[in-house]
Amino acid sequence: MTKLKLHNAMWPGLVGKGDEEGQEPPISLERMLELTAAAEVDGQKFDGIDYFLFLPHTDPDASDDELKAIADLIASKDLKVGSLVAPVWPGTVGDSAMGDDAQQAKFLDAVTKACRIAKIFNEHGVRDYGVIRIDSAEHGVEAWRANPQANTKRIADTFRKAAEIAGEHGERLAAEGEICWAGMHSWRDMLNLLEEVGMPQTLGFQADLAHTYLFLMGYNAPEHALLNADYSEEAFYAAYQQMTDQLRPWTIDFHVAQNDGEVHGAGSHDKTGKHCPADDPNGKLDIVRCSQYWLKDSADRGIQHICWDGCMFPNTVLETPETWNTILKSMIDVRDSMQA
């Protein structure tokens, strides 16, 4: 088995950040790259980054030359680009995948723009693996609950059209299961959506350790909870295997993360599984062991890299070099466990 490449995400410098009252300012792409490139554990460094395709890091309508300059910058840090995050949300390029035809058209436009950028990065040589990440771009689950079956079918229709666009560009889409996204807010609803789309070669699942922990607890879907709050270790891993056995065959992108059992939101981002530092003493997850459930047979699904996600960390944490060394150590441990 080829060693999994180790990536850091760039969006922790953006998601939940802003210039409104109570918000911390975004951290520039240049600074995020510096922090990533500086991390090192026993001679091992990050191999690359996963990249958010929106301002202030990237104008999704940037010219070819501007995008090539970004690729040059990333490559100058001896980093590759892996998965890309399409700007599918209202307020970026896109809009709700559950919405009307005009909203759907915006969503599909965001995927088209992401595929264009992917092609430029691929031709440059800075990117030769990874997927394009999407979600339903419908904040919260209340509107979805008004008619779950019809709303899931509408999201699936949008996703199928998006997958057709991706396929025409030689790309795959990964839908990120997360409790804040309608129709993707529980393991069962996520599976229903993937099966409704029915395009496993082009559209799969992006699993995040922090978010999928909340799937177990049924945070936004108590009827799909697999664990009680006072669970034992034995019960945890039985439930974890039940969830991963269902979703792993669809999983084509993977985020290493930690969660303390809480939810967190910042700025315009709804409350979702709280990302914690890799060594958080309140972390609920054995990161290495949990990752193994998702990464079993990962090469068969085309997974060539894994990515750390520390979305909505405070800037003081992000700006601390030791944060990234600790994260990198966890990533190395996950990778090496898959080689054993």
Image (cartoon, helix red, strand yellow):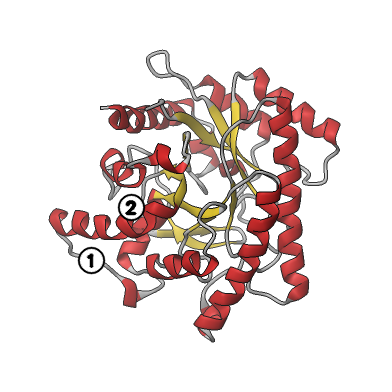
Q: Percent x, y for residue 91?
A: 73, 61
**Local crowd size for mark 2, using a 10 Å CA cut-off: few (<14), some (14–19), many (≥20):** some
**Which residue does the image show at 68% across and 75% down from the upper left?**
99
Residue at the disc numbered 1 = 229
First reached walking from the N terminus: tag 2 or tag 1 = 1
* 22 displayed left or right of 217: right
How busy is the neighbourhood of tag 1: few (under 14 within 10 Å), some, or many (20 plus)? few
Q: Position of residue 308 (x, y in %)?
A: 46, 38
Please, what is the three-letter code of the amino acid marked with disc 1? Answer: Ala
Quadrant where the N terminus lies? top left
Location of mark 2 (residue): 260
Furthest residue toward bottom: 146
Residue 211 has which mark? none
Which residue is located at x 59 percent, y 71 percent? 155
Left or right: residue 239 compared with residue 82: left
| Number of numbered callouts drawn | 2
Where residue 264 appears, as percent x and y from the top left, is 46, 58
Amino acid at circle 2: Asp
